[in-house]
């Protein structure tokens, strides 16, 4: 066996061992739920969405913009197509009990938007976590909450009914 054949044999063996190791690692780690595109899909809290899944994937941005215009320009506040309600249902705690933030690939919105190369600007103003998360923080005063939130999102707490 010459040097060239030995080199090919070693390279092939190394590649085979790496492939077997990668395959075995893939079997032992199931990871989070993913859709056909590989995007993370956490289990929602609700029984069903406000619209069929295919429709929401294709048109949710239009629904959110329409809802934004109704709320900001006409003062109409309803739960249907509300970003707060989407977050409350779809952003659920992981196995570790923590809620993913928007800069984490496990966040419901971030996973699909990253694969689609779409920049999210919703969370520059809106909370990226469910409202119930904020009620567990010490104090109810928005200004007391602000340092704990580490973002500019406390207005969501103000806009909830009964507060």
Image (tube, helix red, strand yellow):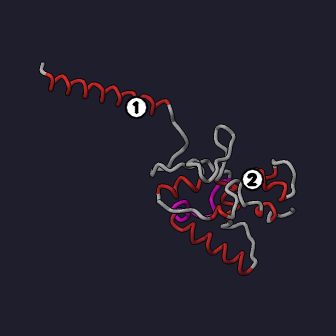
**Where 97 sits versus 16, above or below?**
below
Distance between the alpha carbons at the discs numbered 2 and 1: 39 Å
Tell me if 64 is positioned left or right of 57 in this view.
right
Q: Using the rendered view, name the quadrant where residue 52 is placed.
A: bottom right
Give whichever of 107, 81 is nearer the camera.
Answer: 107
Residue 96 is situated, as x and y percent measured from the top left of the image, at: 66, 37
Give whichever of 70, 11 is nearer the camera.
Answer: 11
**Residue name at image x 47 percent, y 48 percent:** 38
Residue 76 is situated, as x and y percent measured from the top left of the image, at: 74, 76
Give whichever of 76, 53 is nearer the camera.
Answer: 76
Tell me if 112 is positioned left or right of 160 in this view.
left
**Residue name at image x 81 percent, y 64 percent:** 158
**Residue name at image x 81 percent, y 51 percent:** 135
* Quadrant position of the C terminus in the picture: bottom right
Magenta stretch bounds: 46-57
Residue 89 is situated, as x and y percent measured from the top left of the image, at: 67, 54
Residue that badge 1 annotates: 22
**Mark 1 crowd level (few <14, some 14–19, many ≥20, 10 Å Cα):** few
Q: Earlier in the sequence, mark 2 or mark 1?
A: 1
Residue that badge 2 annotates: 149
Magenta stretch: includes residue 55: yes
Residue 48 is situated, as x and y percent measured from the top left of the image, at: 63, 56
């Amino acid at each position: 066996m010459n040097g060239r054949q030995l080199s090919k044999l070693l390279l092939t063996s190394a590649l085979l061992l790496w492939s077997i190791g990668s395959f075995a690692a893939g079997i032992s780690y199931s990871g989070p739920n993913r859709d056909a595109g590989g995007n993370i899909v956490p289990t929602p809290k609700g029984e069903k969405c406000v619209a069929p899944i295919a429709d929401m994937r294709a048109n949710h941005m239009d629904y959110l913009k329409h809802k934004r215009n109704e709320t900001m320009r006409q003062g109409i506040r309803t739960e249907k197509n509300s970003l707060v309600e989407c977050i409350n249902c779809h952003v659920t705690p992981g196995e570790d009990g923590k809620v993913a933030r928007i800069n984490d690939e496990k966040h419901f919105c971030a996973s699909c938007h990253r694969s689609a190369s779409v920049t999210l600007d919703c969370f520059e103003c809106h909370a990226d976590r469910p409202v119930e998360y904020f009620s567990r923080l010490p104090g109810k005063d928005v200004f007391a909450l602000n340092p704990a939130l580490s973002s500019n999102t406390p207005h969501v707490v103000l806009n909830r009914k009964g507060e």
